[in-house]
Image (cartoon, rainbow, N blue to C red):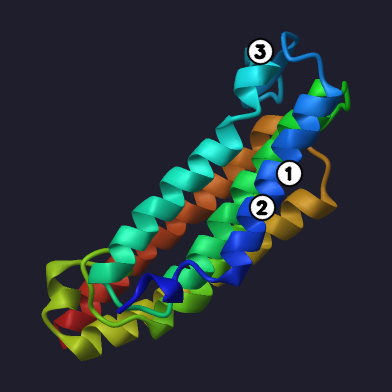
Amino acid sequence: MTTNRILNRVHVAQLIVIFAVAGLGYLSLDLDQLVPIHWNIWGEADNLWPAKWALLIGPFLALVFLGLFAAISVKEEGAWLAPLTTSILALFLLIEVIMLLSGHGVELNVPRIVTMAVGLLLAVVGNYLPKTQPNKLFGIRFPWTLNDEQTWAQANLFAGWFFMLVGLATALFAALFEVAAPLYFVFLIAGVAAALIITTAYSHQISKK
């Protein structure tokens, strides 16, 4: 398998946009001004860096991630790698845009935005879980699923629908309802925990049949 199945033109375009947003920040912000790079669960910025360093976070994470997934793609074959790469690069782009806008004084409900984005990422993960084959990195990986292809297929089909449901419900909740910032994370964490616990129990149960 070659890395061009993972590092495709969409990912190159995403990388260019991430660097372009960073470049826009370098041109439009005072590079010594403090820019938020982290927010607490209440949506309050609790860590600030000078813009000249903060704006490098998105490009740096994107390059590290692409290098990691390019290395993985040499050893692992799976339809899930490319779309997952696209989704995570989109998340890095969102983070870069949030930092740029915050540097310009735009008030954002960061917990709400991040919860919505992570919800959509979970939906993407859920969409590709049923398409996976037993592998070393991705899927419902337990001894009882890895040792039996039918159990793997059933477990990942169930998990895929569950994660899609949780992801879409989380994204819609964040998009439609304005609530106290911590509640977005509570909704997200509760959904993911439920998906993991129920999927684990289901996969173990069907392995006994």
> How many numbered marks, from 0 up?
3
Instruction: Give the residue pinned by disc 3.
Output: 50
Q: Position of residue 31 (x, y in %)?
A: 74, 15
Confirm whether residue 100 shows in the render: yes
Viewer-nearest of discs 1 and 3: 1
Determine whether the residue tagged by mark 1 lies in a helix, strand or loop: helix
Position of 145 relative to 60 (above/below): below
Q: Give left or right: position of 145 versus 85.
A: left
- Please identify the quarter of the rendering in which residue 37 is found: top right
Question: Which amino acid type is marked by label 2?
Answer: Ile
Task: Check contact, mark 1 vs mark 3: CB within 8 A.
Answer: no
Confirm whether residue 113 shows in the render: no
C-alpha span from label 1 to label 3: 18 Å
Instruction: Give the residue pinned by disc 1.
Output: 20
Q: Position of residue 165 (x, y in %)?
A: 59, 70
Which numbered marker is on residue 16?
2
Task: Check contact, mark 2 vs mark 1: CB within 8 A.
Answer: yes
C-alpha span from label 2 to label 3: 23 Å
Position of 156 relative to 149 (above/below): above
